[in-house]
């Protein structure tokens, strides 16, 4: 098995230290002891001899991160996202579990995506430096990951279509309508390529350590394409990519951020739309597509593929409505005799 030493392979002193620790691990194996206990990494020494400040900790964490993966534009962007959370910590403070917990509480709101991401990154840091049990961090995770559509007010088709008609001519109107009709994620909207028969393709962005891949999606219902003039593509800010090699995760995140900020500024000409759906969030459009698919009897497997996630994920998020749908079908069979 692999044992991480937290050392760099391109520093002379670290190579000597690695050689010493290899011998210590071998001696432990010969004695029948746990070889992991024989490892005294540089980060552990730093902790034992003096306080380890946040700035040093992040530098060590980055070094280890890129020892496990090749430096590429993609991995650089991934680590940059980790830094977004790590930079919440005061750089000269001592790294402690208490500081991580306190930072999460003070800088993020409960049951939000930002809190969930912050907790996950801080747990990785705590594990890297062996800070002990992370139970307090786990308790702060909240319910964001499990909220799904059950915790949202999902509009029915009639009200949703009225809402889309109102917003269609606005800055992000095409994006909102396309997301509702094809059930894609906000960051996938700039990659949508419509065909004439109600099908379209987009780039699936939820793939770890890999370029996005093309997937087929379908309009639901097909009539909304013409109703909302979706062949007349309008994406603000020149955000557009249709090939995996053209995709940039930073630009995709910026596109979604700009979109959300635009809506949160409460454009006055969309006041009627806000009154119609006062609790509207972009992801409601994707969830509404999923519920529409259930109500129209589309198989779970097919709907999951169109939405770009696994069947297990689909069932997890939409189980409540799937169960209702099964009951409806059963009642229909009984009524037909």
Image (tube, helix red, strand yellow):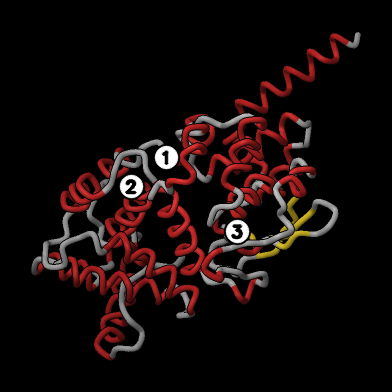
- Which residue occupies the extreme right position in the image? 337
Mark 1 = which residue?
144
- In the picture, residue 9 is in which quadrant? bottom left
In front of the other: 87 or 6: 87
What secondary structure is marked by label 1? helix
Residue at 46 percent of width and 40 percent of height: 271
Q: How busy is the neighbourhood of tag 3: few (under 14 within 10 Å), some, or many (20 plus)? A: many
Q: In the rendered view, does 224 fall on the left or right side of 191?
A: right
Classify mark 2: residues with Cα within 10 Å, few (<14), some (14-19) or many (20+).
many
Identified at 53% across, 44% down, the residue is 283
Q: What residue occupies the far front of the structure in this picture?
A: 269
Which tag is nearer the camera, tag 3 or tag 2? 3
Q: Residue at x 71, y 49 (%)?
A: 306
Coordinates of residue 33 in the picture (x, y in percent): 32, 59
Measure the alpha-carbon separation of dots 1 and 2. Answer: 9 Å
Residue 133 screen position, x and y as percent: 26, 46
Measure the C-alpha gap from mark 1 to mark 3: 21 Å
Number of numbered labels in the structure image: 3
Q: Do tag 1 and tag 2 residues touch (Cβ < 8 Å)?
A: yes
Residue 227 versus residue 314: which sits nearer the camera?
227
Tell me the element at label 3: helix
Say which of 320 and 178 sits in front: 178
Kindly identify which residue carries mark 2.
Answer: 115
Q: In the picture shown, does residue 147 fall above or below 211?
A: above
- Identify whether 156 is placed above or below 65: above
Q: Identify the mark at residue 188; answer none if there is no mark.
A: 3
Q: Residue at x 28, y 67 (%)?
A: 39
Left or right: where does residue 49 sit relative to residue 27? left
Q: Label 2: state its secondary structure.
A: helix
Rendering coords of residue 337 (x, y %): 91, 8
N-terminal-most mark, 1 or 2? 2
């Amino acid at each position: 098995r692999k044992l991480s030493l937290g050392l760099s392979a391109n520093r002379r002193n670290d190579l000597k230290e690695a050689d010493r620790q290899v011998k210590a691990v071998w001696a432990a194996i010969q004695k029948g002891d746990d070889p992991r206990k024989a490892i005294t990494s540089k980060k552990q020494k730093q902790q034992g001899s003096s306080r380890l400040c946040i700035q040093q900790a992040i530098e060590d964490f980055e070094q280890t991160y890129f020892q496990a993966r090749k430096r590429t534009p993609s991995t650089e962007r991934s680590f940059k996202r980790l830094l977004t959370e790590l930079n919440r910590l005061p750089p000269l403070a001592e790294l402690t579990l208490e500081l991580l917990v306190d930072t999460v509480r003070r800088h993020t709101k409960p049951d939000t995506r930002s809190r969930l991401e912050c907790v996950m990154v801080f747990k990785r840091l705590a594990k890297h430096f062996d800070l002990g049990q992370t139970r307090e961090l786990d308790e702060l995770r909240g319910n964001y990951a499990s909220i799904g559509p059950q915790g949202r007010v999902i509009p029915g088709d009639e009200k949703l279509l009225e809402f889309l008609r109102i917003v269609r001519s606005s800055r992000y109107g095409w994006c909102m309508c396309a997301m509702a009709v094809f059930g894609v994620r906000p960051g996938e909207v700039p990659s949508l390529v419509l065909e004439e028969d109600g099908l379209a393709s987009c780039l699936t962005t939820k793939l770890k350590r890999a370029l996005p891949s093309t997937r087929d999606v379908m309009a639901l219902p097909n009539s909304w394409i013409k109703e909302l003039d979706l062949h007349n593509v309008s994406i603000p800010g020149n955000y557009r990519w249709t090939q995996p090699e053209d995709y940039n995760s930073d630009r995709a995140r910026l596109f979604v951020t700009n979109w959300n900020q635009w809506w949160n500024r409460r454009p006055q000409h969309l006041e009627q739309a806000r009154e119609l759906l006062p609790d509207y969030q972009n992801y409601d459009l994707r969830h509404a597509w999923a519920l529409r698919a259930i109500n129209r009897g589309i198989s779970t497997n097919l709907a999951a593929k169109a939405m770009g996630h696994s069947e297990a994920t689909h069932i997890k998020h939409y189980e409540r409505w799937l169960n209702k749908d099964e009951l409806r079908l059963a009642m229909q069979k009984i009524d037909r005799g």
